[in-house]
Image (cartoon, rainbow, N blue to C red):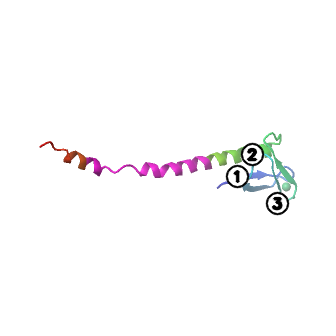
Amino acid sequence: MSSVQIQCTRCKSVFRDRAGRLQDGYSRQCPSCEVVLFFAEDSQHPFIKRAMRSARQVRKELREAEAARLLAPETQAAPPRSFEGRKRSAGRSD
Ligand SMILES: [Zn+2]
């Protein structure tokens, strides 16, 4: 789920790598032809560009999912209402 597709610039074979690792300056070997692929933000190669772009997209989605997960418990922990009702009934003036 957090991995992205990479296409080899030499042999055109497709493999996967983790989106978290696929950042500017990252390099890895193609599992089929063993050429070393370099991943740079300013790369001109369409395969590299595509891989960088999808890695960025996956990282963004992971960040948003993480943020949503962190926010969820707070909305559940709403203050209990039973206290309010008790306070109001105790406020008699006689
Ligand atoms: Zn290859």
Residue 72 counted in the magenta span: yes
Q: Name the residue type under label 3.
A: Pro
Q: Residue at the left extreme?
A: 94
Disc 2: which residue:
52
Q: CA distance from mark 3 to mark 2?
A: 18 Å
**Crowd tier of the residue under label 3, counting other residues whose Cα lies within 10 Å: few below 14, some 14–19, many 20 or above:** few
In the image, the segment drawn in magenta is: 62-85
Q: Quadrant of the N terminus?
A: bottom right
First of labels 1, 2 by sequence position:
1
Disc 1: which residue:
20
First of labels 3, 1 by sequence position:
1
Residue 55 counted in the magenta span: no
Instruction: Determine whether the beta carbon of the residue marked 1 sits less than 8 angstroms from the nearest atom of ligand 1.
Output: no
Eye-nearest disc, 1 or 2: 1
Residue found at x 82% / y 41%: 43
Instruction: Determine whether the beta carbon of the residue marked 3 sits less than 8 angstroms from the nearest atom of ligand 1.
Output: yes
Q: Secondary structure at mark 3?
A: loop
Mark seen at residue 58: none
Eye-nearest disc, 3 or 2: 2
Eye-nearest disc, 3 or 1: 1
Q: Main secondary structure of the magenta part?
A: helix
Residue found at x 48% / y 50%: 72
First of labels 3, 2 by sequence position:
3
Mark seen at residue 31: 3
Mark 1 and mark 3 in contact (Cβ < 8 Å)? no
Mark 2 and mark 1 in contact (Cβ < 8 Å)? no
Q: Name the residue type under label 1.
A: Gly
Q: Quadrant of the C terminus?
A: top left
Residue found at x 76% / y 52%: 6
